[in-house]
Image: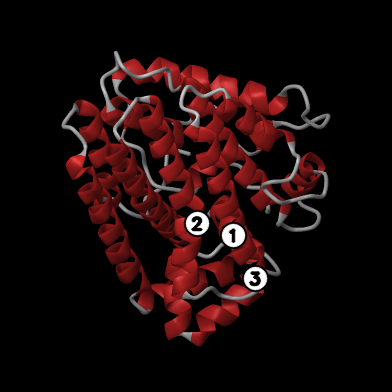
């Protein structure tokens, strides 16, 4: 994937009020823990996790773990979910590294990713990030977490197989939605289920929080898609254009593009050209043509539908400030989709 200076272009905003006071310090400490684990023993010489993670940026996946652990049961009954939250974030980093390995041949991030993965880009390969995540999950107080993690890795691997299938062409709407479910949906669902298990939640509550995470993840990825496309078209910023081109190059499906390409063949043709070279004028043309097809409006409607489904899944979860924060997290996605992010 082409180098992009700021990861904050990638996705939706995380409302600072969702970071409940007792979580702030824990998330800050967790950020440093993940970086230490990623760059510690077993990492290739010179591997810098900061090439893939933005230090100090609020991270939504660990927040989902912490909120789900508290929402599922009382703090007195639950165990500490910090290690599970670190495992989830290491899986996210593994996915970022894998995505970077699919980028342009001479890109710095691609070379770093290939060196880390040792040529084996499968998520279940023996790279140290996956092993660290599995080690943390194996020691989780809820033994089911390790099985959930393996299932999630397999599901995300299916999503990456889809990436490879559509490299060099515009995606279809079903491919975009399948990728969102198998990628961010799978990871958010794992984060919520793992947190709920550590929080000693009942089986129905664990299942509903997992369903919440699935829909929340799809909504989050659609909001990310809208932000990536909108930023490249509206600002013309080099980083925004480079990120859009990186998505085209790696086969990462973006829902607004998939919807627009089905209505305007020139969007698909432009997307194919953009996958071969970064061109700011071409990127703006693709965004403008996509907007005229109504693709942005339809993508926002799908985001609202996924957000509503996520909120419905919370109805059987006991009322608490933590359930309220989970509800607000997806509610604000449909209220302000497509904006630049300050969350990773």
Q: Earlier in the sequence, mark 1 or mark 2?
A: 1
Q: Which residue is mark 2?
A: 182
Q: How dense is the environment of label 2, judged by Cα within 10 Å: few (below 14), some, or many (20 and up)?
A: many
Q: Residue at x 55, y 79 (%)?
A: 268
Measuring from the top left, give residue 200's x and y in whole percent.
34, 25
Q: Report how far apart the C-alphas of labels 3 and 2 lie in the structure.
A: 15 Å
Judged from the image, the secondary structure of the residue bearing numbered disc 3 is: helix
Q: Quadrant of residue 296?
A: bottom left
Query: Residue 238, can we see it?
Result: no
Mark 1 vs 2: CB contact within 8 A = yes
Q: Nearer the viewer, mark 3 or mark 2?
A: 2
Residue 19's disc is none
Measuring from the top left, give residue 249's x and y in whole percent.
66, 64
Judged from the image, the secondary structure of the residue bearing numbered disc 1 is: helix
Q: Earlier in the sequence, mark 3 or mark 2?
A: 3
Q: Which residue is mark 3?
A: 165
Mark 3 vs 2: CB contact within 8 A = no
- Taking depth in this image into account, of 63 and 79 the one nearest to the observer is 79
Q: Report how far apart the C-alphas of labels 3 and 1 lie in the structure.
A: 11 Å
The number of discs equals 3
Q: Quadrant of residue 323?
A: top left
Q: How dense is the environment of label 3, judged by Cα within 10 Å: few (below 14), some, or many (20 and up)?
A: few
Q: Earlier in the sequence, mark 3 or mark 1?
A: 1
Q: Quadrant of residue 319?
A: top left
Q: Check the image and report above or below for 66 versus 253.
A: above
Residue 213 appears left or right of 106: left
Q: Which residue is mark 1?
A: 158
Measuring from the top left, give residue 236's x and y in whole percent.
51, 58
């Amino acid at each position: 994937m082409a180098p992009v200076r700021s990861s904050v272009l990638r996705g939706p905003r995380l409302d600072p009020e969702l970071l409940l006071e007792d979580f702030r310090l824990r998330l800050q400490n967790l950020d440093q823990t993940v970086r230490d684990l990623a760059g510690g023993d077993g990492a290739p010489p010179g591997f810098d996790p900061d090439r893939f993670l933005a230090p100090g940026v609020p991270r939504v996946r660990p927040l989902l773990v912490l909120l789900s652990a508290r929402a599922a049961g009382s703090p007195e009954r639950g165990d500490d979910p910090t290690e599970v939250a670190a495992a989830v974030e290491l899986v996210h980093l593994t996915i970022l590294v894998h995505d970077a390995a699919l980028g342009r041949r001479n890109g710095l991030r691609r070379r770093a990713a290939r060196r880390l993965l040792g040529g084996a880009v499968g998520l279940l390969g023996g790279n140290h990030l996956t092993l660290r995540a599995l080690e943390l999950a194996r020691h989780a107080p809820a033994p089911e977490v390790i099985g959930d993690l393996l299932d999630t890795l397999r599901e995300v691997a299916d999503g990456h197989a889809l990436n490879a299938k559509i490299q060099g062409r515009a995606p279809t709407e079903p491919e975009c939605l399948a990728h969102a479910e198998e990628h961010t949906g799978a990871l958010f669902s794992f984060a919520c289920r793992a947190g709920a298990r550590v929080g000693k939640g009942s089986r129905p509550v664990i299942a509903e929080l997992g369903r919440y995470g699935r829909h929340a993840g799809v909504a989050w990825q659609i909001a990310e898609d809208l932000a990536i496309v909108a930023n490249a078209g509206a600002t013309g910023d080099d980083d925004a254009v480079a990120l859009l081109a990186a998505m085209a190059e790696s086969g990462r499906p973006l829902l607004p593009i998939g919807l627009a390409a089905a209505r305007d063949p020139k969007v698909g043709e432009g997307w194919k050209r953009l996958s071969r070279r970064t061109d700011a004028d071409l990127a703006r043309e693709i965004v403008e043509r996509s907007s005229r097809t109504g693709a942005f409006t339809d993508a926002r409607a799908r985001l609202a539908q996924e957000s509503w489904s996520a909120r419905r899944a919370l109805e059987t979860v006991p009322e608490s400030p933590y359930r309220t924060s989970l509800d607000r997290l997806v509610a604000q996605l449909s209220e302000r989709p497509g904006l630049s992010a300050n969350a990773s």
